Image: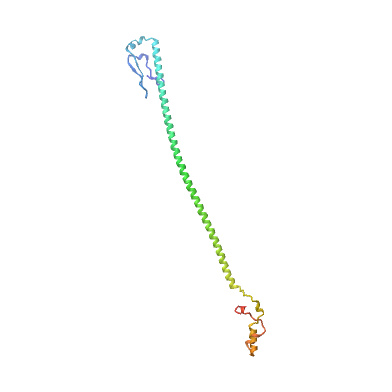
Amino acid sequence: MWGDEGDYYLPRDSIKGQLLVLPSFPTFENSEKVEVTPAAASSGATTSPKKLNDQGSAQIHFRERQRAKVEAWRANKRRELEEKREAEVALQRARYQAEEQKRQARMNSLRAKLEDFVKRREQIVASRAEYRAVHERAGRAARRELCALISARIQERLIVSPSRDPSRLLSPTKSWKAHVDTSSVGVNITGVGLSALSCRRAIPTWRAGLNS
């Protein structure tokens, strides 16, 4: 029969001279066997209290040994489970660290590619801005030159700038030269000649073809 804590004990009155085998626990070695001889069984009724006490103490010691074995087995089992759990935790930690390293390497690669892309984009934007600025400056210079050329041509058409000849003030006019020539020849001046020699302000030759 089983006791309160799962221990096996034998009633004193049930000993009938049989070979009793105690139950075996898992992973235990050969279980101890208690053999009761027929002589002891026949004399069980006249067994002294001292022998009964010895048998009880033997059973108590046996139960203690069995309990110690069970506790050792449980402790060993707990230790194995703990070691297994620690091994699994270490394996998971190693896997996590490997995955974290891969992720960090991938992130570093992506960060480097992004920085390279941003740098090249900034260079392209700067070169485009410089080209646009140079093109605008060249366009403004060309427009200024074109405006200056058009203005010069307009000035040439609208504003007349005759050359000044101070010696003309002392030289005779064509009418006077004609008068002198005809006077020396003795030709009478009539008609148009008289009107040309009349006292009036003459028009300079450089203004002859221009409207007043």
At horizontal 40% and vertical 13% (from top left) the residue drawn is 54
How many marks overall? 0
Is residue 67 shown left or right of residue 168?
left
**Which part of the image, by quadrant, shows the C terminus?**
bottom right
At horizontal 65% and vertical 88% (from top left) the residue drawn is 184
Residue 71: give x, y in percent of width and height.
42, 23
Res. 102 image quadrant: top left
Residue 120: give x, y in percent of width and height.
49, 52
Is residue 75 shown left or right of residue 145?
left
Residue 140: give x, y in percent of width and height.
56, 62
Task: Say above or below: 96 vs 174.
Answer: above
Res. 191 image quadrant: bottom right
Residue 20: give x, y in percent of width and height.
34, 17
Q: How is the image coloured?
A: rainbow
**Which part of the image, by quadrant, shows the N terminus?**
top left
Task: Say above or below: 206 vs 93.
Answer: below
Task: Say above or below: 41 vs 83.
Answer: above
At horizontal 56% and vertical 63% (from top left) the residue drawn is 141
Pick the residue in front: 212 or 109: 109
At horizontal 41% and vertical 17% (from top left) the residue drawn is 61
Is residue 54 shown left or right of residue 204?
left
